[in-house]
Amino acid sequence: MKPVLIIRTGRAPDAIRARHGDFPHWFRLGAQLPLRRLQVVDVAAGDALPAPDAVAGAIITGSAAMVTERAAWSERTAGWIRHAMDAELPLFGVCFGHQLMAHALGGRVDYLPGGREIGTQPIETLATTAHDPLAARLPTSFRAHTTHEQSVLEAPSGAVVLARSARDPHQLLRYGPHALSTQFHPEFSADVMRAYIRRKRTDMHREGFDPQRSFREVAATPIARDLLLRFAHHHGLSHGARHR
């Protein structure tokens, strides 16, 4: 049985990691991935990626890095994404992973106009979700956790925009029958979201945002989380669970 790949592009901050764990753990829980099938590759640390046909699917994590830095490891991973798309490998990118997928496939990534987006945000689905194999069951609006400074400013040619927030028009993108990505964080719990707001409160004050209000507005995001789980179910990456 082929492994399920978590492409680790960064790490949670030390204080958050010590209390809440790290990216691979959050994705494993959110997608209900069997531990025995999991393969974590830390591309930011220089780990080599396996051939796309050697894995069953891949999840690409967030990172404190910026896609626009064009780091060598990031550009190598972008090349791997293009090969994975050719191989029709199931792919799910989140935050940095979302931006890297869009960049790899011809979109444009840069800083989000107006500054960072952070906190539990309302996400609005578009009419394009009607026939999407995963997004069709999303309501017209749902909540999701966000924390990012850069964003997809232009989606790749041929990509389908499925959802937006008030400030980011590209919260959910579909690139083909097996590949999609989210700017929001379906793997975050409410406690993790609060921890990020605590960590960023000084930056938020400086940029004119109210961290106390953002902290108060943190809420559970079961619909966003379910999207990650349904991706794993749909592509047979999460064993022992029924398709939703």
Image: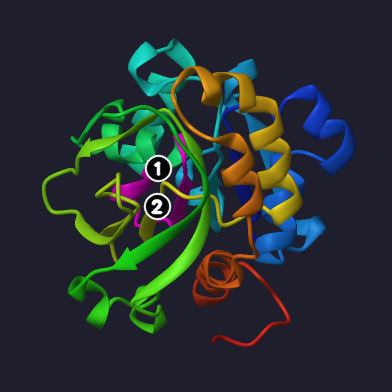
Can you give x and y, in whole percent of width and height, for residue 12 in the image?
Answer: 70, 30
- Is residue 92 rendered magenta in the image? yes
Using the image, determine if residue 220 lies above or below residue 23.
Answer: below
Between 129 and 148, which is closer to the camera in this rendering?
148
Using the image, determine if residue 240 lies above or below residue 213.
Answer: below
Q: Earlier in the sequence, mark 1 or mark 2?
A: 1
Residue highlighted by disc 2: 181
Q: Amino acid at mark 2?
A: Ser
Using the image, determine if residue 233 lies above or below residue 22.
Answer: below
* SS state under label 2: strand
Using the image, determine if residue 33 lies above or below residue 145.
Answer: below
Which quarter of the figure has residue 48?
A: top right
Can you give x and y, in whole percent of width and height, for residue 181 in the image?
Answer: 40, 52
Q: Amino acid at mark 1?
A: His
> For the point 46% across and 47% down, which residue is it?
93
Horizontal placement of 126 versus 26: left or right? left
Q: Are marks 1 and 2 in contact (CB under 8 Å)?
A: yes
Residue at the far left in the pictured view: 157
> For the point 22% across and 58% down, which residue is it?
161
Residue highlighted by disc 1: 98
Can you give x and y, in whole percent of width and height, for residue 46 in the image?
Answer: 61, 16
The residues tagged by marks 1 and 2 sit, at their Cα atoms, a distance apart of: 5 Å
Between 175 and 226, which is closer to the camera in this rendering?
226
Residue at the far right in the pictured view: 19
